[in-house]
Image (cartoon, rainbow, N blue to C red):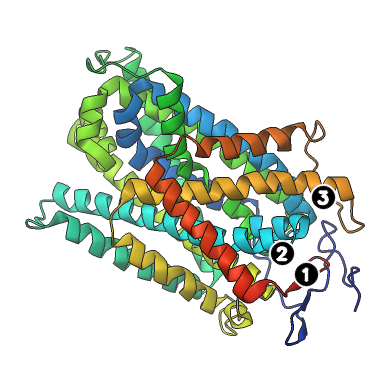
Amino acid sequence: MSDQPTGTNIEGDAPVVETVVETDEATVTDDAELERTLGLIGGLAIGIGTMIGAGIFVFPGLAGAEVGTAATVSFAVSGVVALLVALPTSELATAMPKSGGGYYFISRGLGTLAGTVVGLSLWLGLVFATAFYLVGLGFYALDALALVGVSVGASPGVIVSALAVLFGIGFTVLNVTGTENAAKLQNGIVALLLSMLVAFLAFGMFDVLGVIGTKPSGGTEADQWAALPILSTAALVFTSYLGFAQVATVAGEMKRPGRNLPVAMIGSVVIVTVMYVLTIFVATSVFDRNQLGQFGETAMVEIGRELLGVGGAFVIVGGGLLATMSSANASILSTSRAIYGVSKDALLPRWASRINLRYGTPHVALGMAGGPIIVLAATREVQLLAEVASFLHLIMYGLICVALVAIRRDEPEWYDPAFRVPGGPAIPVVGAVSSFGLIAFMDPRSIAVGAVVILATAGWYLYYARDVKLRGVL
């Protein structure tokens, strides 16, 4: 069997190559692909929609409570790390525009062991991230009920868990019925959300700067401008920046991937970073660290109330619902594509990559995504879910950068990206060091849970996937 390209170009962007997977049991050839139905707007909507939820509507209270106004630097640091990874990811994605994202690039650049660990870790990392988004959605739904006068009794935590589970089931079913349906919902949510946020942030900035109203003092609690707390907070909020890589997980479904992939990934990071920094600046100018800590996950509701009264609270609750819905919907889609990519290579049982003949979606992979997400969402462990997701993604991001260096060094015949990172190996090397380095500032409990996941995926490789040999490029 040959590992050379056997297909034709899709819109001239990248070679289509037959998938050849060898195991002890059989050799399988599978060239079935998902349909390319997502355009540039769809890619930006997935990237922005996933990132904007946690960053703006859940983290201001948590991050502001840690370091106060210095959280603006924490978000900026995370944004720079994300950009350093988005550039190498864009190059790899235009050379290999297939579903699977980081797993796909790492397995072709660093081999089956690294690919198995990253592929399964990406699946589980997205599970933790999606559960985090669903919990945030549950908190905002609870606030929405309170604003309209609906009492939930003495057990609000149970209601949050129940709402998170119900939304998780609903988004999973929606994604089974077709990528195009999920993308339409995503595009509409993101367009409405951005309009609301731009208007709110414009008013908030004018108010904070004293152009209108009375300039708020931001309270009396001192900010923490030391490097350690700023970097620790950056590690916590990095979950906000997972969306750009999720664009790569649906690369196999994007039209004109050579142009749309890098624009969607890099553009979403830049747009969202600016919005994060402005939002946290407004939040920490209105309330001090202690007050933000008391408000917790829905601190933005109180900021809206402080700036615009009850109407402002309604705007933020509506925006929070839209944002967390957007993040959860896009993440469930991306989680299933990570499973799909790994199972097509037989690193998971091949039945996990089955495509529903009616809807053209990987329904088995969606079930494997939605099930554990729903279980974790019921726990309501917001910070743990966020940091474990960050840990697993930072491992993958660092290895993506290493994979780019390795592939450029070997220069295989099939490698012909439509986009190249400038500056030689400098950016991917700095991206790798930054990704791995940020892990050191995480909570030890989150690192321990993430390490257990990594060890479990390595154990799966030894038990199931060590005899799998990958040839060529999907």
Residue that numbered label 3 is attached to: 407
Secondary element at image label 1: strand
Label 3 and label 2: CA atoms lie apart by 15 Å
Name the residue located 57 percent from the left edge and 75 percent from the top edge. Answer: 361
| The C terminus: image quadrant | bottom right
Of the pair 76 and 120, the residue shown nearer to us: 120
* Residue type at the position of mark 3: Ile
Of the numbered discs 3 and 1, the one sitting upstream in the chain is 3
Say the numbered circle drawn on residue 307.
none
Name above or below for residue 301 compared with residue 7. Answer: above
Say the numbered circle drawn on residue 470.
1
290 on left or right of 38: left
Label pair 1/2, CB-CB below 8 angstroms: yes
* Residue type at the position of mark 2: Thr
- The 10 Å Cα crowd at callout 3, few under 14, some 14 to 19, many 20 or more, is some
Say the numbered circle drawn on residue 112.
2
Q: Which label lies toward us, 3 or 2?
A: 2
Secondary element at image label 2: helix
Of the numbered discs 1 and 2, the one sitting upstream in the chain is 2
